[in-house]
């Protein structure tokens, strides 16, 4: 098949996406596909083979059979590019518009989980009615974050209440919507979900950060040796079962398709959902692929499977009357 791999994008995750995109292109070629690399520049232009893309609704994309968005964060993982691909009428890898938009917004995502009784930390939105009292009741440190970003950008743990307003201001530089969360205890554990209807849920992996880092910040995520993935995670069998069950449940609840990495905090037997990333870091050494590889699915086969899932989902979506 001929596959358009989209990478770059306008968000602060541009570079990370370029790395993911290069890996995906290699993986797809290794699986026997033709790849057209499409780079979304920081200014938003789409470039393929040195030329700027001209898009026409319902005319597809560069004669490709499917698109593989390897884009992270706003303007790539948030439903906007997915909307464009819908309008172009080309099957694409991963979640659709609605699931992407729900999962990128930590407030919307948590509200949805709360409505379904899924365990997570307590939280509030900066500026909502009674938020100061609510925030004061959440414990310490408070975790202040832009609602719609990623890669730990704009996040501050606030131990001193006097620092709360500055942390909110700093998060607001990225997003007018700011979430304040209670501190989660325990280990950070992640697991990969693959599928549309029948889901494969990987073994959970534990994120061990370097001793001189307090939390899984931007540096720990991307600096060489900043983190180590421990597979399987050092948690009980019961916690592992619970976590995998929750990952599948949250994936379905949000209406995801194709792939997602679901992130948790685990303290003893307590398992709290942190977030679900619809386009997680996707290089050959990223957590998402590593966890599936532990179950026997190599990277090129994973890329190939995602292509099949994209086609299956597109076909299914077109089977309804509208
Ligand atoms: N409520 C919390 N309690 C403890 N640590 C947190 C909490 N929220 C975030 N963190 C830390 O910050 C990191 C990034 O937060 P996260 O919500 O996953 O944002 P991002 O979308 O940027 O990955 C987490 O991996 C964890 O290390
Ligand atoms: Mg995270």
Image (spheres, rainbow, N blue to C red):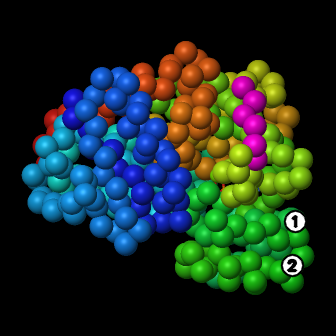
Q: Residues within 10 Å of mark 1 (few under 14, many from 20)?
A: some
Whether residue 294 appears in this view of the structure is yes
Quadrant position of the N terminus in the picture: top left
Instruction: State whether label 2 is within 8 Å of ligand 1.
Output: no
Relative vertical location of residue 101 with respect to residue 280 in this rendering, above or below = below
Taking the magenta stretch, the answer to whether it contains residue 272 is no
Give the residue drawn at x 48%, y 60%: 14
Horizontal arrangement in the rendering, residue 242 relative to residue 2 (left or right) = right
Q: Residue furthest front?
A: 50
Horizontal arrangement in the rendering, residue 212 relative to residue 192 (left or right) = right
Q: Provide the residue span drawn in magenta.
A: 225-231
Q: Which residue is mark 2?
A: 161
- The x, y position of residue 133, in whole percent, is 79, 78
Q: Which quarter of the picture shows residue 213?
A: bottom right
- The x, y position of residue 207, in whole percent, is 74, 40
Instruction: State whether label 1 is within 8 Å of ligand 1.
Output: no
Whether residue 278 appears in this view of the structure is no
Give the residue drawn at x 81%, y 28%: 234
Q: Specify the label residue 312 is tagged with.
A: none
- The x, y position of residue 63, in whole percent, is 13, 43
Contact (Cβ within 8 Å) of mark 2 with mark 1: yes
- The x, y position of residue 311, in whole percent, is 25, 32
Horizontal arrangement in the rendering, residue 94 relative to residue 234 (left or right) = left
Taking the magenta stretch, the answer to whether it contains residue 230 is yes
User: Secondary structure beneath disc 2?
Assistant: helix
Q: Which residue is mark 1?
A: 140
Relative vertical location of residue 48 with respect to residue 52 in this rendering, above or below = above
Distance between mark 2 and mark 1 Cα atoms: 9 Å
**Depth check: 281 or 113 in front?**
281
């Amino acid at each position: 098949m001929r596959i358009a791999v989209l990478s770059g994008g306008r968000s602060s995750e541009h570079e990370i996406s370029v790395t993911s995109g290069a890996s995906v292109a290699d993986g797809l070629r290794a699986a026997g596909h033709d790849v057209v690399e499409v780079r979304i520049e920081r200014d938003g232009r789409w470039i393929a083979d040195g030329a700027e893309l001209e898009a026409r609704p319902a005319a597809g994309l560069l004669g490709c059979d499917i698109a593989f968005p390897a884009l992270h964060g706003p303007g790539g993982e948030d439903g906007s590019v997915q909307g464009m691909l819908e309008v172009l009428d080309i099957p694409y890898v991963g979640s659709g518009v609605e699931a992407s938009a729900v999962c990128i917004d930590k407030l919307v995502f948590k509200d949805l989980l709360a409505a379904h009784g899924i365990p997570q930390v307590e939280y509030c939105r900066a500026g909502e009615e009674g938020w100061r009292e609510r925030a004061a009741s959440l414990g310490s440190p408070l975790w202040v974050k832009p609602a719609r970003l990623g890669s730990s950008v704009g996040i501050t743990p606030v131990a001193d209440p006097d620092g709360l307003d500055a942390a909110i201001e700093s998060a607001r530089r990225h997003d007018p919507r700011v979430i304040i969360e209670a501190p989660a205890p325990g280990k950070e554990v992640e697991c990969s979900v693959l599928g549309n209807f029948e889901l494969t849920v990987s073994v959970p992996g534990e994120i061990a950060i370097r001793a001189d880092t307090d939390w899984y910040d931007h540096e720990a995520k991307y600096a060489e040796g900043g983190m180590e993935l421990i597979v399987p995670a050092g948690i009980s069998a019961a916690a592992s079962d619970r976590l995998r069950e929750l990952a599948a449940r949250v994936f379905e609840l949000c209406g995801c398709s194709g792939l997602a990495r679901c992130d948790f905090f685990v303290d003893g037997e307590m398992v709290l959902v942190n977030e679900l990333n619809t386009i997680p870091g996707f290089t050959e050494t990223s957590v998402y692929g590593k966890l599936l590889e532990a179950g026997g699915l190599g990277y090129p086969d994973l890329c190939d499977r995602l292509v099949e899932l994209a086609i299956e989902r597109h076909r299914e979506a077109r089977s309804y009357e509208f």
